């Protein structure tokens, strides 16, 4: 039974090694095609030089001096462009040739990874090779173990992209950015720094154990000059408004929008004692007191918004209440002040008998 298990593991390693070699051959072919393209470009420039040389010679032999001068000026202008193509071609040709490994070498690398890291996970469906690191702790901050996964089908993009991911298995993300699980890992991508070239050479040469070892060494090292989030601010929280990172003691949670804010971007409602951010607060136009949305009321008369303390039981603000009281006082005065009782004055002739002449 044990022998069958070992044979199954070796078959899986051989299949994985073949997949890697296939990708590395494709990568090498892509590099050779680039050399071919540069060679063609350089050959075209050389042909232009030869063509201009013949034309220039003919113009000089026939004493076409104005034409000779024009050709000379054109050659002078083209020299800069030719020099640029020459340097590009030389750099491409002089690039170190990557010696591809043999099948047995890759299998030996896989066995070495197993011995070095204890376990190797091969997923032929996703064409990935993964290991799990020991728990990592930097300057007293526990970051947990990480899974390093190399994707064989992405190695062809090695020049422009990283064909591997760094996944935190027990994430203790930075307080200001949940996508930063390590000072040098963001969105599961590693900031390689000086490891950029060694990592790519290890992959191109099939030195898989060296590849994983370099990654682990970077994860176990903290560079304070280039972190996504520094360890000194790791446990802090980023203010949603201004973005400033604050410690837990200086962080305030807005119960209205469910976000964290610093002391400068937050306040509280003195009526219900609720902590709120400035964006969720409301300033009463009467007492200028800051209130939350639960402690504001609309005046039934003027329909303006005030805090609860500035609205009476009848639903009126102080201004509308004063106006109503003034109006009631005026009506009361009109009712209590009666007009003067004018005595009925009879005309002079009223009550006198009419005497005939």
Image: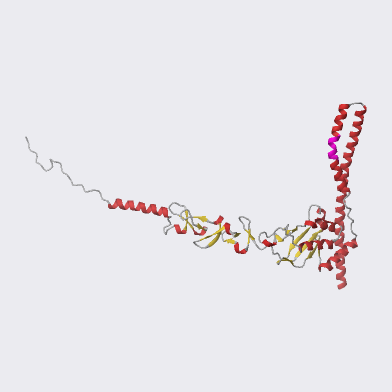
Q: Position of residue 16 (x, y in %)?
A: 85, 61
Answer left or right for 109 relative to 290: right
Q: Residue at x 58, y 61 (%)?
A: 252
Residues 90 and 187: in front is 90
Which residue is at the front of the view, 208 or 10?
208
Residue 304 as seen in the image, left or right of residue 234: left
Region of the chain picked out in magenta, as a range: 75-82
Residue 1 highlighted magenta (yes or no): no
Residue 87 seen in the current view: yes
Residue 269 coordinates in the image, percent (x, y): 52, 60
- Foreground: 125 or 37? 37
Q: Nearer the viewer, residue 287 or 30?
A: 287
Residue at horizontal 38%, vertical 53%? Answer: 324
Question: How many marks on residues?
Answer: 0
- Residue lying farthest to the bottom in this orientation: 1
Q: In this view, which residue lies farthest toward the left?
A: 357
Pinpoint residue 187: horizontal percent, then vertical percent.
72, 58
**For the point 91% across and 34% down, which residue is it?**
53
Q: Residue furthest right?
A: 61
Residue closest to the far top: 63
Screen quadrant of the C terminus: top left
Residue 194's place in the image compared with 347, above or below, is below
Q: How is the image coloured?
A: secondary structure
Q: Quadrant of residue 112?
A: bottom right
* Magenta stretch prevailing secondary structure: helix
Q: In the shown orientation, is residue 334 left or right of residue 299?
A: left
């Amino acid at each position: 039974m044990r022998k069958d298990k070992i044979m199954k593991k070796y078959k899986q390693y051989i299949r994985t090694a073949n997949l890697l070699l296939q990708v590395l051959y494709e990568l090498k072919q892509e590099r050779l095609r680039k050399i071919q393209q540069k060679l063609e470009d350089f050959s075209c420039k050389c042909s232009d030089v030869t063509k201009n040389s013949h034309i220039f010679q003919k113009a000089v032999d026939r004493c076409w001096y104005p034409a000779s001068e024009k050709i000379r000026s054109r050659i002078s202008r083209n020299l800069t462009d030719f020099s640029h193509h020459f340097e590009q071609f030389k750099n491409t040709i002089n690039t170190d040739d990557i010696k591809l490994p043999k099948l047995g070498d890759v299998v030996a690398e896989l066995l070495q990874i197993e011995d070095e890291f204890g376990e190797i996970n091969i997923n032929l469906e996703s064409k990935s090779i993964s290991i799990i690191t020991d728990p990592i702790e930097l300057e007293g901050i526990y970051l947990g173990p990480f899974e390093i996964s190399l994707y064989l089908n992405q190695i062809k993009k090695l020049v422009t992209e990283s064909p591997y991911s760094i996944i935190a298995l027990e994430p203790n993300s930075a307080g200001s950015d949940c996508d930063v699980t390590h000072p040098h890992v963001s969105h599961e991508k590693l900031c390689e720094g000086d490891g950029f070239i060694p990592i790519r050479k290890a992959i191109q040469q099939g030195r898989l154990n060296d590849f994983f070892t370099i990654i682990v060494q970077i994860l176990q090292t903290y560079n304070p000059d280039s972190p996504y989030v520094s360890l000194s601010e790791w446990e802090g929280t980023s203010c949603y408004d201004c973005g400033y990172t604050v410690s837990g003691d200086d962080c305030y949670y807005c119960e209205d929008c469910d976000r964290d804010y610093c002391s400068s971007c937050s306040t509280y409602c003195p009526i219900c004692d609720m902590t709120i951010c400035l964006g969720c607060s409301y300033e009463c136009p009467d007492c200028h007191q800051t209130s939350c949305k639960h402690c504001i009321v609309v005046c039934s008369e003027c329909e303006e918004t005030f805090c609860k303390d500035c609205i009476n039981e009848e639903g009126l603000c102080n201004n509308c209440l004063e106006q109503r009281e003034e109006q009631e006082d005026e009506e009361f005065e009109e009712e209590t002040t009666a007009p003067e009782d004018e005595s009925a004055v009879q005309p002079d002739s009223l009550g006198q008998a009419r005497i005939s002449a």
